[in-house]
Image (cartoon, rainbow, N blue to C red):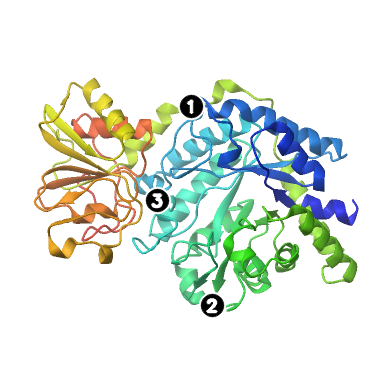
Amino acid sequence: MTTKQLAGQVIVGYYQGTSPQAAADAVRRNGLGGVIIMGDNVPSNPTDESAGLPAVTKAVQGAVKESGRSWPAVIGIDQEGGPVTRITSGVTPLPGAMAYGAADDAALATQLAKDEGQELRSLGVTMNFAPDADVTVGPSDPTIGVRSPSSDPQRVARAVNAQVAGYQQAGIVPVIKHFPGHGSVTTDTHVDYAVQAQSVEQLMKRDWVPFASASKAGVPAIMTAHIVVKDVDPNVPSTLSPKVLTGQLRDKLGFKGLIVTDGMNMGAIVKKFDRGGAAAVSALEAGADVVLMPADASASVSAIEKAVASGALTRQRLIKSAARIVATTRHQHVSAPDASVRGSHDDDARRLAKASITQLGGRCGRDLVGSRVRVEGGTAEHRATLTKELKARGVDVGLQGTRVNLLEGGVYNAGESSAGGGAEATSPGTSGVIKAGDSGVQIALDTPYPLALRGSDTVGLAAYGSTQPTFAALADVLTGKAKAGGTLPVAVGKDGVGSAACR
């Protein structure tokens, strides 16, 4: 391969629109190694968003083949489940990763990842930028939230390793993220780079536990985060730091697979470090193998070519990364689209929902609502979905009866609430309110932190998602037809990790 071809091979770019031609042209224009499918690249279809994707992935593979390459393209997607779900219909709906931490069932996590992987592979996707291996610090984590399996690093490691195994069984390359850990920093790297103030010793005991465990287990790929590790390289984001990617991830943790950058078009990079494709060169020099979503793919290819010509980046270094990509993609079987597997795993999704829903307060396995219920809070769609499920179980849903309140928000910060005043409190951006003296049932559909405000007579249910299987499982728990199977993966007020009424 020429230097230009090698430079294109290590870049996975983005494209505009939903047409197969646009995706293929993005590859042809710069000889890219592949593309990432973002939410706005998924053709709009309320009943089956997946339907238009096989044509896109086929076109991308065709563009790679036309260039004379005998290995598959990288066709990646962020299909984590929960709030980061690019394909929202036509595939099995999954909750946030915190559900896996609450269930803490490795076999179930492997099965769900295998299910999801089979569905993605049937669409022509070869790589999923999941699972999330971040260890959340709780309510002060503004970015990751329910995307993290737990605040317990061992729970996170178990969930991540199990999902990695499932994806690989399905023939999908899983990319765990976001090294050096996004769950304990308070800046969103989509906006600016974040600073990790913990020492390496502290990180090894917490944030890096899942990454070290996955590396030992042979995870094929790890995504970086644009986070400065102050104790290692105080002025450079990890994505661009040889001291972090090579010195820590490769040498200290022993990772031997693909290092994939987080999106290089994010604010953390473009605001300060990317001038004419320079950030792509810096990432490769640092030890990255895949440059994901550079702001300008053409400029990045040119910058890499120039860096090799000048000796700033060795051609051998470029060959090494390209070879890693080729070796990884060649292991993945690119199968013909098979619509029969898509959306066919709802039974497993219901098993996960029942195993993860966590009950706080009340008596385990008992009817929590009685024969009459009023459903409040949440969105109209979610109220309607829960109402339908309750009615199917013989419950009269109207304006009277036990209050079932849906809480939709993400991160809850007690310091910003009016809880101390005792009148009422809600998490920022949350739909639904917990009132002082409330009875009934409070249901947190995202992170469980708002349940810290429930009164002693109030039952709390943490659901970690708002999929149809989640609402079906919630209705079973509310009516006493099933026990809530999960335990808290994070602390909620006075309730620590592992707490639950049903233990």
Q: Which mark is residue 93?
A: none
Q: Are marks 3 and 1 in contact (CB under 8 Å)?
A: no
Mark 3, residue position? 146
257 vs 94: above or below: below
Q: Are marks 2 and 1 in contact (CB under 8 Å)?
A: no
Total marks drawn?
A: 3
Mark 2, residue position? 230
The quadrant where residue 477 appears? top left
Mark before the other along the chain sequence, 2 or 3? 3
Name the residue located 24 percent from the left edge and 45 percent from the top edge. Answer: 432
**Classed neighbour count for the residue bearing mark 3: other residues with Cα under 10 Å, few (<14), some (14–19), many (≥20):** many
245 vs 326: above or below: below
Mark 1, residue position? 46
145 vs 347: above or below: below
Q: CA distance from mark 2 to mark 1?
A: 46 Å
Tag 2 secondary structure: loop
Residue 109 place in picture, x, y as percent? 45, 41
Q: CA distance from mark 3 to mark 1?
A: 25 Å
Name the residue located 38 percent from the left edge and 45 percent from the top edge. Answer: 99
Mark before the other along the chain sequence, 3 or 1? 1
Of residue 211 and residue 427, the one placed in the foreground of this image is 427
